[in-house]
Image: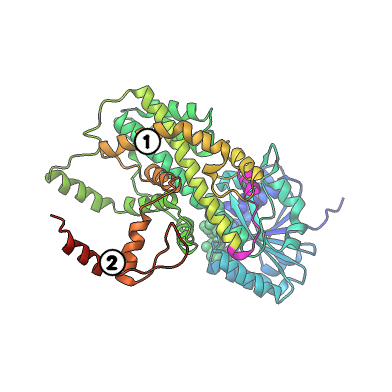
Amino acid sequence: MAMALPRIGLAGLAVMGQNLALNVAEKGFPISVYNRTAAKVDETVARAAAEGDLPLFGHYTPQEFVLSIARPRSVVLLVKAGAPVDQTIAALAPFLEPGDAIIDGGNEWYENTERRAAEAAARGVLYLGMGVSGGEEGARRGPSLMPGGSLQAYDNARDILAKVAAQVDDGPCVTFVGPGGAGNFVKMVHNGIEYGDMQLIAEAYDVLRAVGGLSNRELAAVFADWNRGELESFLVEITADIFLVGDDDGEAGGELVDKVLDKTGMKGTGKWTVQQAAELAVAAPTIAASLDCRFISGLKEEREAAAAALERAGIGGAAQAAPAVDKQQLIDDVRQALYASKICSYAQGMNLLKAKSEEKGWGLDLGELARIWKGGCIIRARFLDRIKRAYQRNPRLANLVVDPDFAAEMANRQAAWRRVVALAVTAGITTPGMAASLAYFDTYRRARLPANLVQAQRDLFGAHTYERVDRPGAFHTEWTKLARRRAAAAPLN
Ligand code: NBP
């Protein structure tokens, strides 16, 4: 039986591309593949044969690759974001025809996608910027997909994407996110939220270890237990596993996690998220704290020197002043602090998406985005279903923390949350993410803030004017002159 020409092709066969192509083929969709360096084509073809004779066909030139795909073509790119995407498009473009679609699956800056979409449109070629999350395993078994751009391009590949994506109780983890660069933007914020989650988990670990004195085995048990409750998520699950891995090379044994250098790498999506939050005047302090911690973690030598210098000055090691704590109570408190902090972090990410959607007219459906993150991606978690429902109840929800269900959860957890942050501060342990989440919550929930004083200062030195609580209008006051007059009339002391 002659097999139909593939409807889809994939260029860029590194970790993500190779696994996504095998996933497509495994779901019964023949696929053509191509990579700039031929060895990766051979590697992918060999894997397709080994993993069950999957319908995957290797090609060695852009022309041969494009022409092997049936029109209208869906051509997925999974090359390094930035210039490599432009170079790959330039190589493929001479062979693409009107109606064909380019689907860039990389972590691309959304404006690059919008520029390329306009360039492609001039040739009649459709364009999708599609966030792909889930790493190697997700790409192979079922990722979360966040496609945005041309609806026609999405419709052409809709059945394939629906089968390839992770499957959860309420459908495949893919949806048409919105026009333009919406798919890339959503993936960027997903990654920013991921930074926040990882930081919050690291802080929970730090408090339990440094203040609670938990061993790695105990930590593994605690995280495994948490993963059976409200914190159930991919990141909590893998964290439990990490604590169990022994160090084969170590003379004294012990666990590998203790040998890993405390210096976090990054590739840019977290930084973009914080930059966009600033651009849009949306507070994202938990995500910003996680980024700051990565920056400071990078200063390993400086931190070692600072620890020594400050110890000489009399400020001892972290946790040295930690009060005695009840271990079980601490574990329970930290669980609640982690959960409450996480809600605030997601509130920030969702509000950033909402602000961008309003600016660009993207019409993002926040509940639907929470749904497609329930499976496949790195931030997949049980509580995303609660977020989905919160936005379904009220699509215009101002902030997750005021949804009635989440508000009740915050109320139940705030005492434990405050105990953990206070304990960490007392002990000299840093919990920047948890503290940022708590400050965010406490700032947001206060009907009156000390911003009146800042506004008065601005009016005093810059005549920026201020509004009053008791009547409308813009006011300016000669603060200094009036203050001098008052002080002269009634000296302060
Ligand atoms: P990389 O980001 O490491 O990119 C490697 C691929 O880019 C190879 O196929 C390489 O071809 C190709 N490439 C480069 Br580099 N320069 C090129 C050029 N000038 N012309 C043509 N091809 C070029 O791969 P990855 O880790 O699989 O990630 C792919 C995309 O997916 C990235 O945007 C990444 O941010 C995103 N992503 C990655 C993950 C993950 O867990 N790794 C998760 C989610 C999203 P070559 O073989 O010829 O050098």
For the record, the magenta segment spans: 359-375
In the rendered image, which quarter contains the C terminus? bottom left
Task: Inspect the magenta stretch and tell me whether residue 364 lies in it.
Answer: yes
User: Does dot 2 land on a helix, a strand or a loop?
Assistant: helix
The three-letter code of the residue at mark 2 reads Trp
**Residue corresponding to mark 1:** 418
**Does the residue at mark 2 contact the one at mark 1 (Cβ under 8 Å)?**
no
User: Does dot 1 land on a helix, a strand or a loop?
Assistant: helix
User: Looking at the image, is mark 2 or mark 1 earlier in the sequence?
Assistant: 1
**Image: 59 above or below 345:** below
- For the residue pair 491 and 400, the one nearer the viewer reads as 491
**Image: 141 above or below 155:** above
Residue 38, x across and y down, in percent: 60, 61
**Residue corresponding to mark 2:** 479
**Image: 449 above or below 463:** above
Residue 200, x across and y down, in percent: 42, 41
Q: Residue at the spot x=21%, y=33% of the render?
A: 321
How far apart are the two marked residues, 2 and 1, measured between alpha carbons? 38 Å
